[in-house]
Amino acid sequence: MAFRSFASCFSPVPFLRPGTTRFYRAVAVGLLLLFCVTAGKAQAPSPEPSTRDSALVITSDVDLFWSAYDRIVEEEDHAKQLQLINTLYIEPGTEGLTKFMASRDYTDTMYVKLINAFPKFWTSVRANTLQAHTVRPRVAGYVARLKELFPEMKPAKIYYAIGGLNSGGTGEAGTVMMGTEVSAGDPSVDVSEFDSDWLAGVFKNQTTENLVVLAIHEYVHTQQAEYTDPEGVNVAAVALVEGSCDFISELVVGQPLPATYMKVGRERAGELRAAFLQDLYGTDFNRWVYNGGDTDLGAADLGYYVGYEISRRYYENTPDKRTAISSIIRSDWTDAKLLDSFIIASGYYTEEELTTARSLLKKE
C-alpha cells in the first residue's frame, strides 16, 4: 500500500460510513478542497501541453454522467433508473471511473440514491463540473512542468468523473481520479438539502480553480514511494507525505497554497514546532492530520504545515535542487533512519531534539 492512498477526500455524510480507516485517510484532501482559493493570484505560466499530454487528462466521464442524469430524473421506476446509470455512465465509463468506483465502493444503487435525494445540489453544481473541460490544457501544462522539475516522473492519467459526494480526488499508481462534483464546488452551489454541513464548509471558500490545484496535488501523490514498514507510519511520516506534496505543488504552480493550516501554521510556527515534537513518533494522528475540524492547536490538519515546512527547508538547504526534489517525492518515510536524517538536514529539528522525542514515545 502506498502513502499516496492517504490522499483522498471523504465527507462525514452519515450514510457514507464515517469512522472507517478510509475515511480518516480521506479527510486530508477535503481540507485542501476547503481552503484552495486561487482566483486572482498570480501563477507560474504552465508549459504549453502537447496533444499527447492533453490526452492524459480525460474528462469524458463528466459528460456521460450528465447524459445519464438527464434520463434518470425523468424516470420514476427505480429498476429503470438503475439500468440507465449502468448503461449510460458506468459501463461506457473510462478505466479511471472503474478504478474510482472500486476504490470508494461506489455502486449503481448509490448513484441513483444520490441523484434522487439532492436535486438542488445537482442542478446547481452542473455548470461547475463542466469546467473540467476548460482547465484540461492547463492541468496538462502543469504536469509537464512537474516533469521538468522531476525528470524521473512516471506518467499517470488524470480522470475527471462524478463520484459519490464524498471524494474530491485520490491517486494510485498511474492514475489520478477526481470527484468533480466536489472539487468543482463553490459558494454558488446549493447544499441546503444536506444534513451535514461538510460540503457547505468545503465550498465556502473554494473556486473552480481547485480543479487545477487539486489535480496537481494528487499527481504528486502518484509519484510517492511505496512504504516498506507499516510499523513506521507515524505522525511525522504522514505529515511529510502530505506536506511534501503541498510543497512540490507550490513549486509547480508557482504560488503558496492558500490554506488555513498554512496561515495558522506561519502565525504559530514556534508553538507548533514545540507541540509537534511531542507527538512526532506517535501514531495518534487526530491532532495533526485527517481530523476534519479545528483542534486545540487552532486549525485542522496543521501536520500538513509542519510537513510542508520541513520539506521547504530541506529544499532550501540542499544545493542540488533536482536531487532535493527527488528526495522529497521519493523518500520512504517509514524508514526511521531516512526520516530522521531528512528532518535533521532540513534544520527543523536537531538530532538531540529527535532523541528527546523518541524518549517521550518510550515513556508512553
Image: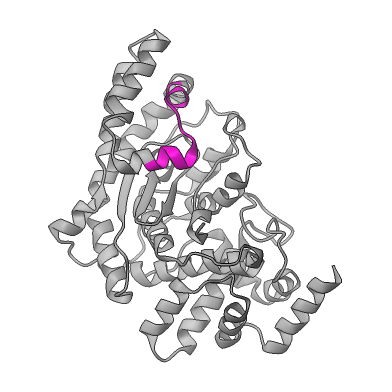
Q: Is residue 263 visible?
A: no
Name which quarter of the figure residue 222 lies in.
bottom left
For this orientation, the residue located farthest to the left is: 51
Left or right: where 157 falls relative to 364: left
Q: Viewer-proximal residue, 121 or 8?
A: 8
For this orientation, the residue located farthest to the top is: 77
Identity of the residue drawn at 69% across and 71% down: 280
Is residue 71 on the magenta stretch?
no
Left or right: where 49 falls relative to 230: left
Measured along the vertical axis of the image, is residue 249 above or below residue 83? below
Identity of the residue drawn at 39% across and 52% down: 210
Quadrant, the C terminus: bottom right
Measured along the vertical axis of the image, is residue 219 above or below residue 88? below
For this orientation, the residue located farthest to the bottom is: 319
Q: Is residue 322 visible?
A: yes
Identity of the residue drawn at 54% across and 43% down: 10
For this orientation, the residue located farthest to the right is: 363
Identity of the residue drawn at 69% across and 55% down: 286
Left or right: where 18 falls relative to 104: right
Is residue 106 on the magenta stretch?
yes
User: Residue 87 at what x, y percent from top left?
Assistant: 29, 23
Left or right: where 338 falls relative to 222: right
User: Residue 78 at what x, y percent from top left?
Assistant: 42, 11
Name which quarter of the figure residue 341 lies in.
bottom right
User: Residue 19 at what x, y percent from top left?
Assistant: 66, 41
User: Residue 147 at what x, y percent from top left?
Assistant: 28, 70
Q: Main secondary structure of the magenta part?
A: helix
Tell me where the magenta segment starts and ends, as one range: 99-112
